[in-house]
Amino acid sequence: MRCPFCGSDETQVKDSRPAEDNTSIRRRRICPDCGGRFTTFERVQLRELMVLKKTGRKAPFARDKLVRSFQIALRKRPVDADRIERAVSGIVRRLESSGETEISSEEIGLQVLEALKTLDDVAFVRYASVYRDFSHAEDFENVIAEINAKISRDSTAD
């Protein structure tokens, strides 16, 4: 692992332990050349996934893009970072264990929508407005009606 401070290739692992989500390993490292300390995370990757874009183009799956989507939708919302990480890890795990090497961006978007629906209604509407390409106020009204119907069903089930 290259040192982010001086660029040395000779860093040493001082401590390894499972990360909070138990889906990665947290490693504390030190650079013997400059004395810099930093943390890395190591994750299991079951298979290399490719994303099929709407344009027909293929791109490697990037977990960071998925995390960024959640962060944008959940900006200034009271959702704990651990819940976001669990949602992202769950989606990645489902994608990797699906057996497919090529996943459509639509499928990923649907999984994000499902996860956001359980995390935060406002984030769900934000993401849906981009994902479903809202162009009119009625589009927002329809999604909000959908959420209200879900809330009504859930409260009568209790």
Image (tube, rainbow, N blue to C red):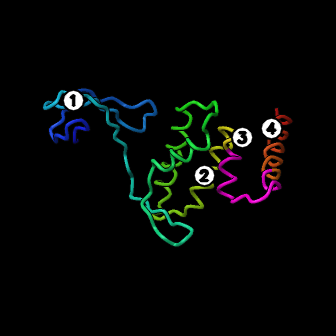
Q: Secondary structure at mark 3?
A: helix
Q: Which kind of residue does numbered mark 2 sit on?
A: Gln
Q: How many marks?
A: 4
Q: CA distance from mark 4 to mark 2?
A: 21 Å
Residue at image point 55% right, 37% down: 84
Q: Earlier in the sequence, mark 4 or mark 2?
A: 2
Residue 49's tag is: none
Secondary structure mostly seen in the magenta stretch: helix
Occupied quadrant, residue 138? bottom right
Q: Earlier in the sequence, mark 3 or mark 2?
A: 2
Residue 121's tag is: 3
Q: Quadrant of the C terminus?
A: top right
Identify the residue under disc 1.
Answer: 30
Q: Earlier in the sequence, mark 1 or mark 2?
A: 1
Q: Nearer the viewer, mark 4 or mark 2?
A: 2
Range drawn in magenta: 124-140
Q: Which kind of residue does numbered mark 3 sit on?
A: Asp
Occupied quadrant, residue 74? top right
Q: Secondary structure at mark 2?
A: helix
Look at the numbered discs 4 and 3 and tell me whether their residues touch, using CB distance below 8 Å. Answer: no
**How many other residues sit within 10 Å of disc 3, few (<14), some (14-19) or many (≥20)?**
some
Q: Earlier in the sequence, mark 3 or mark 1?
A: 1
**How many other residues sit within 10 Å of disc 4, few (<14), some (14-19) or many (≥20)?**
few
Q: CA distance from mark 3 to mark 1?
A: 43 Å
Residue 111's tag is: 2
Residue at image point 31% right, 32% down: 39
Residue at image point 55% right, 61% down: 105
Identify the residue under disc 4.
Answer: 154
Q: CA distance from mark 4 to mark 3?
A: 14 Å
Instruction: Check residue 127 for magenta coloring.
Output: yes
